[in-house]
Image (tube, rainbow, N blue to C red):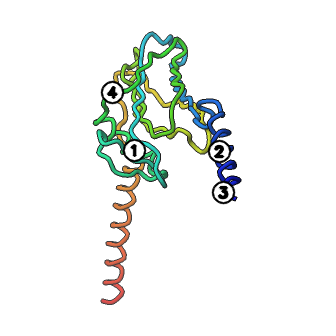
């Protein structure tokens, strides 16, 4: 019985070792496309930084990014991307091609920060963002972040949601004041 079990174990190990190297290791591709419209792309660069490695339920941030765990559903937070961008160390920088795109290939599983480290002539850089590789089971991803042309007017900053929240709170407060006045008149 022992010899049969040992033979089975040796057979399984031999089969596992005979698989081609990298057969179980998937690699991803991340493409970033910047649309400059009719204008030619004359320069620009995008840098990709590995900021987290997979762990159960999310990603463990590298020590250089403060450590800790980021849950999978929080991995696309714009605020987290901004904060991690402030801590960015060394990454892989690629220059944009004439079509305004870069392709990062051979990417291992993890959480990555994408930053436009050199802006295109006539455009503000895009807002940094986080990328999961793989994302929703897909190892090949394409992103088209928004870039704004430089004009005489300053770019809009902040999220519209913040302004709507403040407006909603002001209207709610006004409604409460009106209800209080109406109740006083009704009682008095």
User: Disc 3 or disc 1, which is closer to the eye?
Assistant: 3
Q: Secondary structure at mark 4?
A: loop
Q: Residue at x 33, y 89 (%)?
A: 187
* Location of residue 165 with respect to 135 vertically, above or below: below
Image x and y of residue 47, in percent: 40, 25
Q: Which residue, given by chain and number where applicable, does mark 1 sit on? A: 159
Comparing 91 with 164, the one in front is 91
Image position of 169 (left or right of 21): left
Image x and y of residue 100, in percent: 51, 18
Q: CA distance from mark 2 to mark 1?
A: 60 Å
Residue 112, picture quadrant: top left
Image x and y of residue 135, in percent: 56, 42
Q: CA distance from mark 3 to mark 1?
A: 68 Å
**Labels 3 and 2: the sequence-earlier one:** 3
Q: Secondary structure at mark 3?
A: helix
* Location of residue 141 with respect to 160 vertically, above or below: above
Q: What mark, if any, has residue 90 been given in the picture?
A: 4
**Labels 4 and 3: the sequence-earlier one:** 3
């Amino acid at each position: 019985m022992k010899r049969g079990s040992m033979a089975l174990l040796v057979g399984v190990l031999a089969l596992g070792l005979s698989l081609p190297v990298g057969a179980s290791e998937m690699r991803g591709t991340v493409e970033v496309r910047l649309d400059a419209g009719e204008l030619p792309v004359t320069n620009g660069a995008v840098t990709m930084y590995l900021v987290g490695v997979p762990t159960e339920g999310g990603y463990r941030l590298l020590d250089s990014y403060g450590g800790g765990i980021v849950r999978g559903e929080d991995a696309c937070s714009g605020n987290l991307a901004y904060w991690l961008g402030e801590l960015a160390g060394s990454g892989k920088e690629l220059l944009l091609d004439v079509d305004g795109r870069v392709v990062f290939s051979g990417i291992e599983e993890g959480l990555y920060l994408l930053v436009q480290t050199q802006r295109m002539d006539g455009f503000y850089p895009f807002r940094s963002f986080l990328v999961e590789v793989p994302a929703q089971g897909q190892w090949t991803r394409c992103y088209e972040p928004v870039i704004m042309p430089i004009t005489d007017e300053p770019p809009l900053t902040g999220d519209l949601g913040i302004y709507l929240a403040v407006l909603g709170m002001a209207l709610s407060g006004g409604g409460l004041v009106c209800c209080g006045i109406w109740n006083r008149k009704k009682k008095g």
